[in-house]
Every structure is written in structure tokens, then in C-alpha cells.
Amino acid sequence: MLKHRFCLFALTALALPLAAARAQPPDVDDHRWEHHREHCEQLEHEEHELRERLAVVQDREEREHVEHRLHEIAADRDLQCRRD
């Protein structure tokens, strides 16, 4: 039992610095990183809103418009933001 606890502790101790290292690339200053993070959060929020809207929209043309916008936002997130 003690061996398992130690392994869990060791894995957690290794995972936390790795997660922190992924959080901000070392070559990006704080202001640019904050702007980038906010931009990605906005894209994520917009994608979520569009998915909710898509679930209830009835009109075919509006549905196509929402689907198109959703694909654009998802593509932007894939290119610009990490999804860890």
C-alpha cells in the first residue's frame, strides 16, 4: 500500500511541473501570453454558444450559417490554441 502511495505521489510531483511548463511558452512575454489566453478563451466560449444554438435552431438557412461559423471557430481554435 505504501508503495502505491509513493508512486502516486511521484507521478503527481512530476505532472505538476510539466503542466506548468505547458501553460506558457518560455519565449512569450506576459502581456502577449495574457492576450493569447483571453483570445483562446473567447473562441472556446463562442464555440460553446454556437453548439448550444445549433441544438435548438429550426430554420435550415440559419442552421447552415451556425454550422459554418462553428467550423470556422473550431478551425481557428485548432490552429491558434492548445487543447490539453
Image: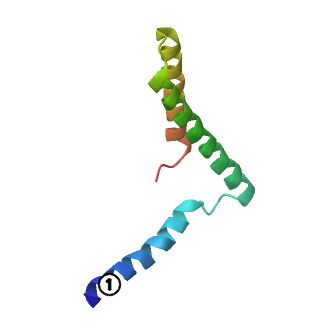
Q: Is residue 68 above or below residue 16?
A: above
- The residue shown at (56%, 42%) is 80
Position of 57 with respect to 34 (left or right) is left
- The residue shown at (56%, 33%) is 49
Report x, y in % for residue 57.
Answer: 49, 18
Position of 14 with respect to 65 (left or right) is left
> Residue furthest toward the right?
31
> Residue furthest toward the bottom?
2
Residue type, numbered disc 1: Arg
What residue sits right under mark 1 in the picture? 5
Position of 33 with respect to 63 (left or right) is right
Report x, y in % for residue 44.
Answer: 56, 41
- The residue shown at (48%, 72%) is 16
Q: Which quadrant is home to the N terminus?
A: bottom left
Q: Along the line of sight, which residue is nearer the eye, 64 or 14? A: 64
> Residue furthest toward the left?
1
Scheme of image coloration: rainbow
